[in-house]
Image (cartoon, grey):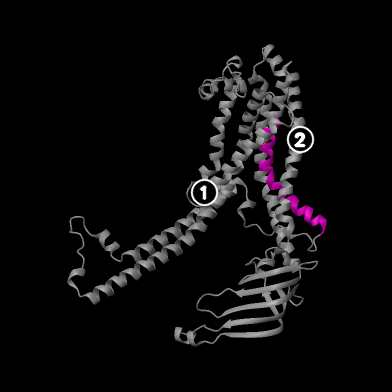
């Protein structure tokens, strides 16, 4: 009897499961299409290349599609069982709700394990394929990586911006601005041109040829010159009708001449490999932060090391100069020196922050990616508990109320995911806690709903809540007189 019942419940579950999974996967793929497809359409890529690339990107959404599918399918399954009074019949036959939920609980555990294997072994391979395909596209169609109206730093040593990109392969350009990256002690150069043509170099594949028309070259030759010579340096603007520039892109091309060559990315690694990566990043960050601490301490007070080594029984260091005893002009010089020193320290601290924030963000990204390999699998089980309990309580099947409730719960989960992710990147929240916090919040909610379902709680009975608030509303309601006295 129980084998027949289990088979029937699992069959009832997998009917909506397959349909919902297909629909949700298509919806998430459409979202990727809106984000990614704009930079590929109309630029010489075949439909097969576009579909292949979108499929590689689409594999990464399985970790969100599967938990939502389990949530929605479990709500619909138990909702239909309750709506057709099959749950009531099972309970009348002495079969508890726990026993009814048991086969689907094992199914959700199996699906969560499959999701873990998928994220750990298959997703990294598809991420690698997508990355290599993008670089191979960059080699044959370099204009694909440029977005009109935005500064792009993908060409090593240069910042470029194109107002318009046209042509079958994106080779025709308008409104061109090129700036060579240089520090304050190197020669500066910027180029403006009305139009241009971007083509791969026929002489050397490691170079990208850019033919510019009707523009200016602005140069400041300030290398190896003092400030006085720089101030006397006249502004130089050279007008040209045609200018051919070659950009070295060997750094990009050499990484992706062959497929599967790009491997240096945390998203290409398994859970075990990420553990070693995290340890290495942690050691590098520790060295960097320690050197920053030593540098800042030496700038703040050159006598810190002396004070730390001084015996405790000695008197504290006495100030060498008292401002009250020196002349005003020297007071001003001392205060001015102290002020400039403090300002220099502020600038130094800001520069250190610019180094610290990317290190924290990079470390948090790796930890979040690793922990979510397991966390999303556990989310499947939590979503089943929530979905099965809600379905048995509301007793409504179909695509109406269950869909609304499932979407609301998933949106809450998704917003929590994004919020804790931002907190982890800022260094406010521990990345390990950030990866598990949504599950830690939803798990007690799932246990509470399961308890309510097992005790036949009328959680969504409107009349029950009306009865509770009726005494309150009666106090504020206006007493109507009888019609005969009006």
Is residue 202 placed above or below 470 in the rendered structure?
below
Visible in this render: residue 93? Answer: no
Quadrant in the picture for residue 162: bottom right
Q: Which mark is residue 424?
A: 1
Alpha carbon distance from label 2 to label 1: 35 Å
For the residue pair 79 and 5, the one nearer the viewer reads as 79
Looking at the rendering, the stretch of residues picked out in magenta corresponds to 46-73
Q: Please provide percent x and percent y for residue 26.
A: 75, 44
Is residue 201 placed above or below 111 in the rendered structure?
below
Q: Please provide percent x and percent y for residue 176.
A: 68, 73
Secondary structure at numbered mark 2: helix
Which residue is farthest top? 93
- Residue at x 81% of width, y 66% of height: 168
Q: Please provide percent x and percent y for residue 245.
A: 69, 78
For the residue pair 374 and 473, the one nearer the viewer reads as 473
Query: Residue 53: within the magenta?
Result: yes
Quadrant in the picture for residue 39: bottom right
Q: Mark 2 or mark 1: which comes first in sequence?
A: 2
Q: Which mark is residue 403?
A: none
Q: Which residue is mark 2?
A: 18
Q: Is residue 300 left or right of residue 37?
A: left
Look at the image and tell me in which quarter the C terminus lies.
top right
- Residue at x 27% of width, y 72% of height: 334
Query: Residue 67: within the magenta?
Result: yes
Q: Is residue 333 left or right of residue 441?
A: left
Q: Please provide percent x and percent y for residue 310.
A: 23, 60
């Amino acid at each position: 009897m129980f084998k027949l019942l289990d088979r029937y419940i699992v069959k009832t579950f997998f009917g909506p499961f397959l349909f919902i999974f297909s629909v949700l996967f298509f919806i998430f793929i459409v979202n990727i299409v809106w984000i990614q497809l704009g930079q590929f359409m109309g630029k010489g890529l075949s439909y097969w290349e576009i579909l292949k690339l979108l499929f590689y990107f689409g594999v990464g959404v399985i970790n969100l599609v599967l938990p939502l599918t389990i949530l929605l399918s479990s709500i619909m399954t138990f909702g239909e069982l309750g709506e057709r009074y099959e749950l009531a019949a099972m309970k009348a036959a002495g079969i508890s709700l726990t026993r009814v939920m048991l086969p689907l609980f094992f199914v959700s555990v199996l699906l969560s394990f499959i999701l873990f294997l998928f994220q750990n072994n298959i997703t990294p391979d598809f991420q690698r394929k997508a990355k290599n395909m993008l670089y191979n596209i960059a080699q044959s169609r370099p204009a694909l990586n440029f977005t009109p109206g935005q500064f792009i730093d993908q060409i090593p040593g240069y910042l470029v911006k194109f107002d318009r990109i046209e042509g079958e392969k994106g080779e025709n350009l308008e409104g061109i601005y090129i700036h060579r990256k240089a520090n304050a002690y190197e020669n500066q150069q910027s180029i403006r041109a009305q139009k241009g043509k971007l083509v791969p170099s026929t002489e050397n594949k490691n170079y990208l040829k850019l033919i510019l028309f009707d523009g200016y070259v602005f140069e400041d030759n300030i290398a190896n010159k003092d400030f006085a010579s720089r101030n006397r340096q006249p502004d130089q603007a050279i007008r040209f009708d045609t200018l051919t520039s070659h950009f070295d892109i060997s750094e990009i091309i050499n990484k992706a001449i062959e497929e599967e060559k790009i491997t240096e990315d945390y998203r290409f690694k398994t859970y075990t490999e990420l553990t070693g990566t995290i340890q290495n990043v942690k050691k590098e960050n520790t060295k960097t932060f320690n050197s920053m601490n030593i540098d800042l301490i030496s700038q703040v007070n050159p006598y810190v090391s002396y004070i730390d080594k001084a015996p405790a029984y000695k008197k504290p260091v006495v100030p060498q100069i008292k401002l009250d005893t020196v002349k005003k002009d020297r007071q001003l010089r001392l205060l001015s020196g102290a002020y400039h020193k403090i300002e220099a320290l502020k600038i130094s601290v800001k520069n250190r922050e610019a180094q610290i924030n990317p290190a924290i963000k990079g470390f948090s990204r790796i930890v979040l990616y690793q922990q979510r390999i397991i966390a999303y699998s556990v989310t499947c089980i939590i979503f089943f508990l929530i979905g099965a309990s809600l379905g048995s309580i509301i007793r409504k099947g179909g695509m109406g109320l269950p869909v609304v409730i499932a979407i609301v719960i998933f949106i809450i989960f998704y917003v929590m995911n994004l919020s804790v992710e931002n907190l982890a990147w800022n260094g406010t929240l521990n990345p390990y806690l950030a990866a598990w916090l949504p599950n830690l919040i939803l798990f007690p909610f799932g246990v509470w709903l399961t308890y309510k379902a097992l005790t036949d709680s009328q959680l969504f009975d409107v009349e029950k809540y009306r009865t509770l608030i009726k005494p309150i509303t009666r106090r504020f309601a206006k007493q109507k007189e009888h019609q005969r006295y009006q």
